[in-house]
């Protein structure tokens, strides 16, 4: 069933593969079905995940929210029940004030506009504003929540996907070997960084931004050069 | 100008064109993608003397007056090379918007606007085709969903009666009629499709230029036969533009490891 041209460059409207007569076919970003075939809707490189899901890897800047994505957002407004959060998509997302670990009507999170949050997209329907949550499905924080201090770096959505993916991106592996820092990567291309010193944060940000078009070996050389420069 | 009613005008004679170009020959194409930093997608498309820079913003929240609850709104801004925008540029905007609305599945992003800004940088004939191709490349760069790709080519009916593909400004000026067509195309990457076009080695097969017409702009003094002949000539030209477009897309995605 792997007749699909995985690794090939695909343009919008291209017929990528025929729908197999039997078995399951799992399609994700950039692919739809049309007249008995799988057709792409944007430009990119065809990839497949380990469980056989096909998707298109493009290099787009604009983020379109999708359910279960993790995002870094800026709180832009505070209403009685919700925060309005800018996640870089076409519309601001809604983050209920009670979608935090341990939040109750009496005990609300202390967040004001301008603050950063790390959350996951709970619903992303095209006709409604996206809804975020800062808890996992069991109600625990699970790493989500208010991001205090630190800095934000804007990268392309494909680099963000790489940084979140497994195996760990070579740039993070190389940086983690020599430096101490905390980061939160959003699929919307925003990367939050926090480090004990500003110099470390800037170094990590530069290394990540530069790593996009480098091979793993080039990345390791670059990080080694950066690390030796700061001693 | 009376043309042969049975056969149509056919390609013109080779002698008349600048730099010895053949009547069915396109000018050299160059496409740069992701040239602008702030736009969501951008591309610069040039065909020797003509060059257009396209920027795509969106899908983003539409202005309240423009918003449509059911579909995305496409806004096109055509900026001439020099001077203010006139009514002829407004007409071009409407023409381009019609083509883009034909390929963007608008229902996918309701309440949003997709803005395409086209800045003419150099003008030497076939500017509308150049602008359409630049818009197509910029939309792909922005990752805006498209139901199909499209290519655009102009041709001119010369006063001697022959058709000239991709005319420059002088040829357009001297022509009896000018045609610009935008035609949708796609590639068939399935094994069946690839086998059918085994002779095309690169780019996963030859472009399938659809028999449908996405947009057409014709003006001047011409017969129906000349129009059909022009369409056939432009269809062949679009096939070549499509092949180039795919090559340039593959090049821009090389960093992702695409082949």
Image (cartoon, coloured by chain):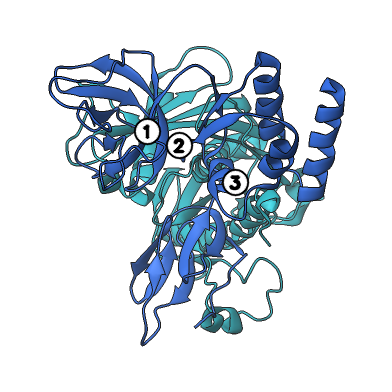
Chain colours: A blue, B cyan
Nearer to the camera, A203 or B58:
A203
Looking at the rendered image, the disc whose residue lies closer to the viewer, 2 or 3, is: 2
Which image quadrant is residue B71 in?
top left
Q: Are marks 1 and 3 on the same chain?
A: no
Percent x, y for residue B98? Answer: 34, 42
Percent x, y for residue A176? Answer: 69, 38
User: Gap between marks 1 and 2, in whole Å?
Assistant: 8 Å
Looking at the rendered image, the disc whose residue lies closer to the viewer, 1 or 2, is: 2
Identify the chain of the residue marked 3, using the numbered disc in the image.
B
Percent x, y for residue A157? Answer: 52, 41
Q: Where does label 3 land, which residue?
A: B159
In the drawing, what numbered circle is on residue A89? 1
Q: What element carries label 1?
A: loop
Residue farthest toward the bottom in the current orientation of the protein: A21
Which image quadrant is residue B211 in?
bottom left
Quarter of the image where the C terminus of chain A is located: top right
Q: Is mark 3 on a helix, strand or loop?
A: loop
In the drawing, what numbered circle is on residue A188? 2
Characterize the local packing of mark 3: few (<14), some (14-19) or many (20 or more) Cα atoms within 10 angstroms.
some
Nearer to the camera, B16 or A159:
A159
Which image quadrant is residue B52 in?
top right
User: Gap between marks 2 and 3, in whole Å?
Assistant: 56 Å
Characterize the local packing of mark 2: few (<14), some (14-19) or many (20 or more) Cα atoms within 10 angstroms.
many
B21 on left or right of A54: right
Identify the chain of the residue marked 2, using the numbered disc in the image.
A
Characterize the local packing of mark 1: few (<14), some (14-19) or many (20 or more) Cα atoms within 10 angstroms.
some
Q: What element carries label 2?
A: loop
A100 on left or right of B132: left
Identify the mark nearer the N-term, 1 or 2.
Answer: 1
């Amino acid at each position: 069933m792997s007749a699909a041209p995985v690794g090939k460059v695909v343009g919008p409207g291209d017929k990528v593969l025929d729908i197999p007569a039997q078995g399951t076919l799992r399609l994700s970003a950039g692919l739809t079905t049309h007249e008995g075939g799988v057709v792409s809707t944007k430009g990119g490189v065809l990839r497949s995940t380990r469980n056989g899901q096909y998707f298109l890897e493009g290099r787009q800047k604009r983020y379109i929210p999708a359910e279960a994505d993790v995002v870094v957002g800026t709180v832009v407004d505070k209403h009685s029940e919700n925060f309005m959060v800018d996640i870089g998509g076409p519309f601001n997302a809604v983050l209920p004030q009670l979608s935090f670990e341990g939040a109750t009507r009496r005990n609300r999170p202390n967040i004001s506009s301008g603050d950063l949050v790390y959350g996951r997209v709970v619903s992303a329907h095209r006709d409604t504003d996206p809804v975020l949550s800062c808890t996992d499905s069991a109600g625990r924080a699970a790493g989500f929540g208010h991001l205090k201090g630190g800095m934000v770096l804007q990268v392309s959505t494909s680099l963000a996907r790489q940084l979140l993916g497994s195996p760990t991106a070579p740039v993070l592996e190389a940086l983690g070997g020599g430096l101490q820092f905390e980061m939160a990567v959003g699929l919307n291309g925003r990367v939050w960084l926090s480090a004990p010193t500003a110099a470390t944060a800037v170094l990590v940000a530069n290394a990540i931004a530069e790593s996009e078009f480098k091979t793993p070996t080039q990345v390791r050389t670059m990080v080694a050069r950066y690390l030796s420069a700061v001693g | 100008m009376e043309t042969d009613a049975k056969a149509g005008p056919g390609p013109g004679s080779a002698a008349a064109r600048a730099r010895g170009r053949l009547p069915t020959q396109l000018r050299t194409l160059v496409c740069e993608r992701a040239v602008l930093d702030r736009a969501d997608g951008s591309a610069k498309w040039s065909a020797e003397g003509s060059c257009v820079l396209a920027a795509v913003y969106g899908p983003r929240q539409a202005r309240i007056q423009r918003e449509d609850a059911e579909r995305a709104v496409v806004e096109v801004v055509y900026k001439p090379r020099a001077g203010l925008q006139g009514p002829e540029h407004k007409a071009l905007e409407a023409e381009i918007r019609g083509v883009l609305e034909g390929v963007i599945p608008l229902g996918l992003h309701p309440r949003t606007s997709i803005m395409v800004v086209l800045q003419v940088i150099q003008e030497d004939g076939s500017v509308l085709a150049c602008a359409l191709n630049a818009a197509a490349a910029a939309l792909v760069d922005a990752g805006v969903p498209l139901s199909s790709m499209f290519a655009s080519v102009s041709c001119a009916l010369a006063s001697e009666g022959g058709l000239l593909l991709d005319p420059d400004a002088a040829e357009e000026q001297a022509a009896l009629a000018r045609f610009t067509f935008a035609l949708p195309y796609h590639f068939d990457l399935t094994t069946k499709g690839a086998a059918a076009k085994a002779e095309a080695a690169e780019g996963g097969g030859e472009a399938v230029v659809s028999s449908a017409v996405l947009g057409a702009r014709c003006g001047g003094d011409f017969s129906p036969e000349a129009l059909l002949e022009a369409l056939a000539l432009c269809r062949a030209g679009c096939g070549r533009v499509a092949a180039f477009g795919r090559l340039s897309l593959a090049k821009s995605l090389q960093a992702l490891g695409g082949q």
